[in-house]
Amino acid sequence: MGLALFCLSTVSYALPSAFTATYDVKKSGMTLGNMQTSLSYNGNQYHYHKKSKTTGLASLFSGDVIVENADGIFNGEYLQPRTYLYHHISKRKNRKTLATFLSPTKVNGSHKNQPFSLDVSATSIDRATLELALARDLLNKKTTFSYLVIEKDKQKRYDLNALGDEVLTINGISYHCKKMIVKRDDQSRKTIFWLAKETDFMPVKINHAEKGDSVVSTLKTFSRK
């Protein structure tokens, strides 16, 4: 299946192809679990799903399961989210964030069982849709990457800087990647993405470092729908 295209006037904007993928997840070098992701389309509507869970000994101690769902429409240059869910369940916690985009400039939701209502920029997106926006912008050869993102119950700016090109060999397959880092004022957290041409610039590796720990998700399988 080729790239999904949506046309506005005489301009076309590419989006990643529909796919399913799995990732191995390690924390500080130790196997933690796995992540499953999928992207699907219905006309100009998208559904992006991510599910992470601990496995093996890690599951005996924490039993963590994290689900993210993002639904929205792609409308020319912009992605317009409709609903976003983040649900983290473990033996110690049950944490959920919900966001409903009532309009491009109004978001209602709840975080830790506390309701919120935000007036936002018309280009605001959720944290999962951020990955689609970044892939779309790389497919369309953009050179600046700045996004307004609804994180928990706030709107934040995410700026990403390019760290250059890198070839990663994973399970015998070479991926030609754009290496990108999320620029944050908070230096205690760092997230680096390796975004491969072969996967329409969806991540083949993610390294998130926080509070002295490093969680690395590495692509295991990838197939287009």
Image (cartoon, rainbow, N blue to C red):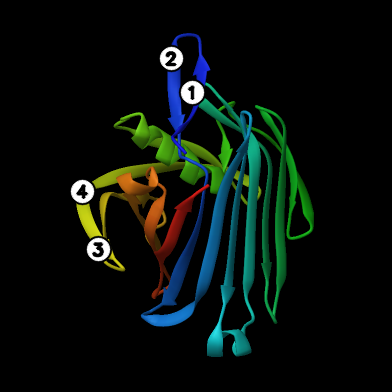
User: How many C-alpha atoms fall within 10 Å of the one at disc 2: few (<14), some, or many (≥20)?
Assistant: few
- For marks 4 and 2, give the one nearer the viewer: 2
x, y (%) of residue 121? 58, 28
- For marks 3 and 1, give the one nearer the viewer: 3
Q: Which residue is mark 4?
A: 165
Q: Amino acid at mark 4?
A: Asp
Residue at horizontal 70 percent and vertical 65 percent from the top: 95
Q: Sequence-wise, which precedes: disc 4 or disc 2? A: 2
The residues bearing labels 4 and 2 have C-alpha atoms spaced at a distance of: 28 Å
From what the image shows, is residue 201 above or below residue 82? below
Q: Amino acid at mark 2?
A: Val
Residue at horizontal 59 percent and vertical 26 percent from the top: 122
Q: Which residue is mark 2?
A: 11
Q: Which residue is mark 3?
A: 169
From what the image shows, is residue 143 above or below residue 50? above
Residue at horizontal 36 percent and vertical 29 percent from the top: 140
Disc 2 to disc 1: CB gap under 8 Å: yes
x, y (%) of residue 77? 48, 23
The residues bearing labels 3 and 2 have C-alpha atoms spaced at a distance of: 35 Å
Q: Which residue is mark 1?
A: 77
